[in-house]
Amino acid sequence: MDRKLVIYVDVDDTLIRSVGTKQIPMPASVDYVRRMHAAGNTLYCWSRGGADYSRDVATSLGIAECFVSFLAKPDILLDDFGDALLNHCQFILPGNASNHQVGAVPQCCVAAVAIQIGIPLNFVLRLTL
């Protein structure tokens, strides 16, 4: 049996781009969410804007049912990996989400996370335990 992933998906500049007050969907990322959900993975949606904002955006995109929960993005991560946490990650930029296949994930990867922690880009991270 394949190990299922726990996937954290960012909102701004990952699921949507904002131009003024208009929110423009990022189709490759929205499709990625649908494919990962259909494959039986567990998805969480998070944003610096908070849990309600994450839920509202996912609802407007018609993908709210793909997520088990909506979260605010953390300010602090307490983890035994410390700075080495990123050494255990595979990065997928939102623009590359349409090329990513479920089967392409190494078995050691058990989570995907879109995160901004002092990095000016949005990433999808795959973390090993």
Image (spheres, grey):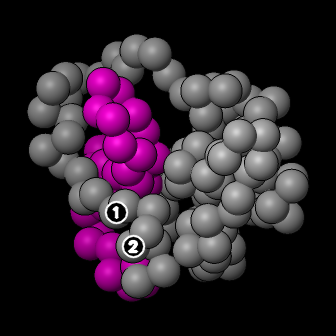
Residue drawn where x is 62% and y is 38% of the image:
46
Residue drawn where x is 35% and y is 27% of the image:
117
Residue drawn where x is 46% and y is 16% of the image:
75
Taking depth in this image into account, of 101 and 119 the one nearest to the observer is: 119
Q: Which residue is mark 2?
A: 96
Please indicate whether residue 75 sits to the left or right of residue 78 in the image: right
- Identify the element where label 1 is drawn: strand
- Across the whole image, how many numbered discs are drawn on residues? 2
- Residue 43 is situated, as x and y percent measured from the top left of the image, at 62, 55
Quadrant of residue 78 within the rendered picture: top left
Q: Which residue is mark 1?
A: 92
- Identify the element where label 2 is drawn: helix
Determine whether 66 is above or below 83 in the image: below
- Mark 2 and mark 1 residues within 8 Å of each other at the beta carbon: yes
Taking depth in this image into account, of 21 and 43 the one nearest to the observer is: 21
Residue drawn where x is 28% and y is 57% of the image:
91
Kind of residue sitting beneath label 1: Ile
Q: Residues within 10 Å of mark 1 (few under 14, many from 20)?
A: some
Residue 96 lies in magenta, yes or no? no
Chain part drawn in magenta = 100-129
Residue 106 lies in magenta, yes or no? yes
Please indicate whether residue 99 sits to the left or right of residue 24 in the image: left
Please indicate whether residue 80 sits to the left or right of residue 121 in the image: left
- Residue 102 is situated, as x and y percent measured from the top left of the image, at 45, 80
